Image (cartoon, grey):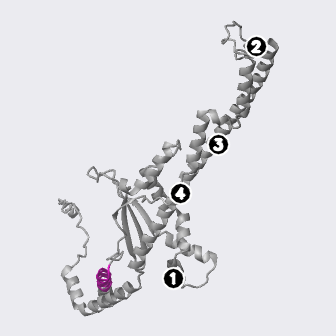
């Protein structure tokens, strides 16, 4: 009996690739329909968030910034100081006062934490922040430190900008909870720094004058001592010369009677005893060695002129305003309308998330119940 061999048909070779697993797709229309169905709830939540944003805008501290823009002084603003320095230089006082150095001193003092503390310690603004009550030193220092941080200075020059202005300027600013306070305090602090700069410049000038006077006094004392020593030696030589002339029997000047005498190099007798006696009389009558010395008289005149310098109140300004301290018209930070809009958008996101999460959880619970 013949057998028939039947080959098995391998069905696994018919479909060599496996089918991808089934993935759940996101139905945007369903999401939109869900959100639309809960529109009333979403609007209520957005409204509540907007109210919260409005309330928060009133609780946010108010910040108003006053600004002033300054540049270097012009010549007319330092003309009095220039005249004083020129007069001092004519008397030999070594003093250098330049517009750039005064301007840099002003900016450096504006940033001084010590000067800010000194200004704020006597400012009614800080006392008002402390409710005008008696406070201890630590609380006062804490308030001064906080307020002093609201002063700012910024260089307006931009090295990357090739089209920058042909001059350098700085922006000075102060931030306060009230616009008028910001403007007034910035202006007062600038004037306080100006007074400090003037005081420093005048002290530098006075110190230069005092140093010059001290130097001239020392030089004059040395010159006078040298001349007095010379005068004393001269008188002593005349005494010895007179003794030599009397011993030699020379009464008249040797050149008046035709005599030929080889004069003594140490004790001159050419004038004769009579001439030497008269000369000695004249030299002894000199009480002030400066009487016949022009250089010493010039030194004394210079010293008198130096002592007569009176600086007084030299008026000058270490800067030029490009913009005086401004009255802020817009507070810092976001406005109320922007805060309300952002709060409403946040409410929209929260409400939408709540609706979608609740919808997903509801669908999952339905599937579990069917199973």
Residue 370 appears in the figure: no
Q: Quadrant of the C terminus?
A: bottom left
Which residue is located at x 53 percent, y 55 percent? 310
**Mark before the other along the chain sequence, 4 or 3:** 4
Q: Which residue is mark 2?
A: 250
Nearer mark to the viewer, of 4 and 2? 2
Q: Residue furthest front?
A: 257
Nearer mark to the viewer, of 3 and 2? 2
Q: Position of residue 154 (x, y in %)?
A: 40, 60
Q: Which residue is mark 3?
A: 217
Q: For label 3, count other residues whose C-alpha is less than 10 Å away and answer few (under 14), some (14-19) or many (20+).
A: some
Element type at marker 4?
Answer: helix
Q: Verify CB contact (< 8 Å) between mark 4 and mark 2.
A: no
The correct choice, above or below, for 137 with respect to 250 in the image is below
**Mark before the other along the chain sequence, 3 or 2:** 3
Q: Position of residue 224 (x, y in %)?
A: 68, 36
The secondary structure making up most of the magenta span is: helix
Residue situated in front as seen by the camera: 20 or 111: 111
Q: CA distance from mark 3 to mark 1?
A: 54 Å
**Mark before the other along the chain sequence, 4 or 2:** 4
Q: Quadrant of residue 345?
A: bottom left
Residue situated in front as seen by the camera: 103 or 219: 219
Q: CA distance from mark 4 to mark 1?
A: 31 Å
**Mark before the other along the chain sequence, 3 or 1:** 1
Q: Residue furthest top?
A: 260
Q: Which residues are magenta?
A: 335-352
Q: Quadrant of the N terminus?
A: bottom left
**Mark before the other along the chain sequence, 2 or 1:** 1
Nearer mark to the viewer, of 4 and 1? 4
As drawn, the label of residue 200 is 4
Element type at marker 2?
Answer: loop
On whether residue 89 falls in the magenta region, the answer is no
């Amino acid at each position: 009996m013949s057998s028939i061999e039947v080959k098995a048909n391998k069905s696994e070779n018919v479909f060599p690739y496996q089918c991808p697993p089934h993935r759940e797709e996101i139905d945007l229309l369903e999401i939109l329909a869900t959100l639309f169905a809960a529109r009333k709830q979403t609007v209520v939540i957005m409204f509540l968030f907007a109210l919260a944003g409005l309330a928060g805008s009133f609780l946010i501290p108010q910040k108003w910034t006053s600004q002033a823009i300054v540049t270097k002084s012009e010549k007319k603003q330092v003309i009095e100081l220039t005249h004083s320095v020129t007069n001092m230089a004519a008397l030999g006082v070594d003093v250098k006062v330049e517009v750039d150095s005064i301007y840099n001193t002003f900016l450096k003092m504006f940033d001084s934490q010590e000067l800010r503390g000194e200004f704020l310690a006597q400012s009614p603004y800080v006392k008002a922040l402390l409710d005008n009550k008696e406070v201890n030193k630590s609380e006062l220092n804490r308030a001064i430190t906080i307020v002093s941080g609201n002063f700012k200075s910024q260089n307006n020059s931009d090295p990357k900008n090739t089209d920058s202005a042909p001059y350098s300027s700085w922006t000075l600013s102060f931030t306060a909870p009230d616009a008028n306070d910001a403007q007034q305090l910035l202006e007062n602090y600038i004037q306080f720094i100006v007074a400090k700069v003037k005081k420093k410049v005048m002290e530098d000038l006075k110190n230069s004058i005092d140093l010059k006077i001290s130097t001239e006094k020392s030089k004059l004392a040395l010159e006078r001592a040298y001349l007095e020593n010379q005068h004393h030696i001269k008188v002593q030589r005349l005494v010895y010369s007179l003794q030599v002339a009397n011993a030699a029997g020379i009464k008249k000047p040797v050149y008046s009677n035709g005599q030929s005498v080889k004069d003594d190099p140490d004790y001159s007798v050419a004038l004769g005893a009579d001439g030497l006696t008269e000369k000695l009389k004249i030299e002894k009558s000199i009480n002030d060695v400066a009487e016949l010395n022009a250089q010493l008289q010039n030194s004394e005149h210079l010293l008198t002129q130096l002592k007569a310098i009176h600086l007084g109140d030299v008026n000058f300004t270490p800067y030029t305003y490009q913009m005086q301290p401004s009255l802020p018209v817009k507070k810092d930070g976001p406005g109320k309308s922007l805060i309300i809009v952002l709060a409403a958008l946040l409410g929209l996101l929260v409400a939408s998330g709540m609706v979608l999460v609740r919808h997903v959880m509801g669908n999952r619970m339905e599937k579990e119940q069917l199973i």
